[in-house]
Amino acid sequence: MRQFLVLAHDAPTEPDFSLDGLPGAGRLDVLCRCVTSALLLSHDIREDSRVWLVLGDSCSVRFEGSDIRRLNPDERSTAALIRGALEEHEEAIGHMDAESSPGVFVSRRGVEEVLEEMKEQTSAENTVVTLHEEGTPITDLDPPTDPIFVLSDHRDFIEHEADLLAEEGDERVRLGSERLHANHAITVAHNYLDTAGFERY
Amino acid sequence: MRQFLVLAHDAPTEPDFSLDGLPGAGRLDVLCRCVTSALLLSHDIREDSRVWLVLGDSCSVRFEGSDIRRLNPDERSTAALIRGALEEHEEAIGHMDAESSPGVFVSRRGVEEVLEEMKEQTSAENTVVTLHEEGTPITDLDPPTDPIFVLSDHRDFIEHEADLLAEEGDERVRLGSERLHANHAITVAHNYLDTAGFERY
């Protein structure tokens, strides 16, 4: 199981945004591309993958590769799924999941609770891998079995998140020589695992 | 110089499409993500990269990393740049480039002329690399100096294109064990070159 946790910093937690202006809606476009990068292959779905978005202090949306339906590659339709989750969130109670669309779940969880839940949902051998430009090269990392990749949207981690990850994270890695957008980082992380064991030049 | 050539099969060649329905406009969403994957880093631009889109038989749009302005990471604003290029295309004469926006050029060129132009624009050591799921693993490829990556949108290459690439292509590679969307393939290709020389597990 590959899991991705994307921490948003400006994204809306209310569904009153326009699908015509995703960058203006707290850079929701980035989050949409993160979801599709995490779950979609060409004409297929990565069923063994899961992505969580944490929007604000206590609003989390989970996309489950094994259950997802109606996820298309474009930003706008993915944003509509997030908007549907935020509509459901207004009714959500505590940490209980509400399924707003097949394979899309929303709950009142913040980053600590989500990370805890992600660790519980996999084997004890899971590895929390923080993606950060100042980390060690991923090529130095023996590909982990049940990785939990944690990354930030267009902003850096805030202090509270950095402290949590310093405490709970197992590895802090960068994916290459360049600073990548969050969604591109997810694509590269997947490919790194897809090609684990391949020799290369 | 890294160059990418994306061959579209259903995309519009007229500017009369809506920015609200990019998937319905011949999957223009895929092409937009290809452009941003090819040229954008986090808060930066890959100035040594260039991407060409071939839309239909004789309509080509070129995005130049070294000159590009107003390219944002979201699909909608990139689609607006393509729409602007198609408006300019109506006025274009022959193979002459028309600059529809800083760093965005449109011309009446088909795939053969574009590939020829791409080869002329780099050193004689350029390598035409066709990305295809049935190619040999990219990990077997010594990272080329001036690669020209050729890939298809959501459809496979048509016969005419496959014949051209069989003739003109130097390598035919796949990027891993999974079939990737075209834009994800571009991200992986960049990372492969970014990390050339890194040892890995």
Image (spheres, coloured by chain):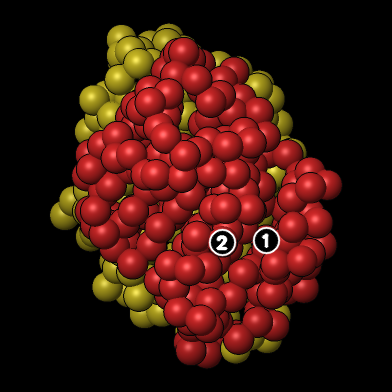
Chain colours: A yellow, B red
In the rendered image, the vertical position of residue A129 relative to residue B74, given as above or below: below
Q: Is mark 2 on a helix, strand or loop?
A: helix
Compare residues A145 and B120 and report the one nearer the observer.
B120
A125 shown above or below B145: above
| Chain letter of disc 2 in the image | B
Q: Residues within 10 Å of mark 2 (few under 14, many from 20)?
A: few
> Mark 1 belongs to which amino acid?
Leu
Number of the label disc, if any, that sits on residue B41: none
**Residue where numbered disc 1 is placed:** B131
Which of the 4 image quadrants contains residue A122? bottom right
Quarter assignment of residue A195: bottom right
Instruction: Mark 1 or mark 2: name the one nearer the start of the chain.
Output: 2
Q: In which quarter of the image is residue B121?
A: bottom left
Q: Distance between the residues labelled 1 and 2?
A: 18 Å
Question: Where does the C terminus of chain A fall, quadrant-wise?
Answer: bottom right
Q: Image quadrant for the N terminus of chain A?
A: bottom right
Percent across and percent down for residue A20 are: 35, 16
Camera sees residue B148: yes
Which residue in the protein does label 2 denote?
A: B116
